[in-house]
Amino acid sequence: MKKVLFMVSIAAMLALALPAMALPAVGGTMELEGNWRQYGPTTVENQLNLGLGFDARTRAGIEFQLGNAQRFFDGLRLDQFQRGYLQRLGSLWAGGPQVVTTIGGLRFNYSPYVAWIGRNDSVEGISFEGFRNGPLSAAAFYTTDKTLGGRVEANLDQLNIAGTFVTDAEQNAIDITGKIVPLPGAQVIATYATADDSDVVKIDGSYSISPHLQLVAGYRSFDPTFDAKWHNPDWDPFYREANPVAQYLGLRGYTVGLRTGAYGMVLSADVDRYEWITTGNRADAIRLGAAKELNLAGNTIDASYELTLPDDGDLQHEVQAAYRAPNGLGIQALYNNVTGGQARVGMNVAF
């Protein structure tokens, strides 16, 4: 109901403003997506984003959810309203830096550990994004439930470091992530996140031994009680690395591996040595993988295969393929001998 009332408020403000403004330009996007699972339901996730551009600096937008569990289009209803927002590009004071101010339904994706809004969710408030001053950039938000958050990033020659924080009456959460290039061909990316005295540490490094051979190594330590209020809530089997909290929660250990190229493929070999923090049980495995971009009659298909040899279990294999047609239709397919098959069909249209 609060979102519906907010939409009505925006409509009223626009109705009062229109007589004094030029006819706005209407644009937006429509996303339609269907997901099939061998051992689960077939679902539909669709979204319509409408934007009114009043001038080069002013924009108003509304978003609706379309369809139900198994229908690609179910019409527009007020109970499917997701968010409404007003945006303005400009300075907050005379001579100040240019920032994008958004008021209404917010979506921020600053850190998957502590500051991430799910794809079908939003929170009411105000945000300021796009501030830049030399190598520094910053963003901040404040919500109607009195949550304050922000991100500050410094992008230097051989070092990129970013700090993200979220605080309210119940929790303080912080993520510090840095990327350093200590020498040519080498890089290290490290993350430390904490919330309610529960910590996350993730370190990834790589070094190119030769133009065709790369050494990689990583360390993970994810406290099983880590539960930042705004960590990434979306789990995607096609892009597992996009949600490290869900992927590694409760695990501690390291990975070492090699990457090389042969026959137009990227080949990988990794050794994982992890343990469950609460029990001490091991979760060791050897992973072998291959990825290749196939060209079939001018059509590009991204394909990959991964074989996992657990230390105390049966082998697992997973095959993925992705194709995007010239008309914008995207198709993804995945088969895992443990979780079964999955497929996704979607299209994104801008107007």
Image (spheres, grey):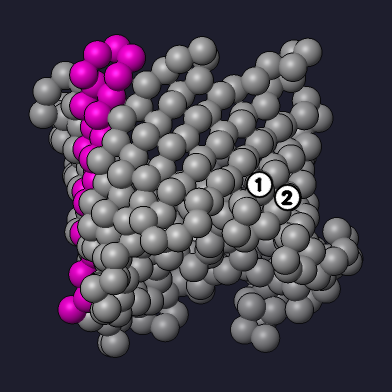
- Which residue appears at 69% of the width and 42% of the height? 332
Horizontal relation, residue 144 to residue 326: left or right = left
Name the mark on residue 262: none
Question: Which image quarter: residue 297?
Answer: top right
Q: Is residue 61 visible?
A: no
Would residue 183 appear left or right of 198 to someone viewing this image? left
Q: Residues within 10 Å of mark 1 (few under 14, many from 20)?
A: many
Magenta span includes 125: no
Where is residue 64 shown, x and y percent of the image? 73, 64
Extreme left residue here?
Answer: 182
- Cα–Cα span, label 1 and label 2: 6 Å
Residue 138 to residue 227: above or below = above
Residue range in magenta is: 197-219
Secondary element under disc 1, as helix, strand or loop, is strand
Q: Is residue 121 left or right of residue 151?
A: right
Contact between marks 1 and 2 (CB within 8 A): the answer is yes
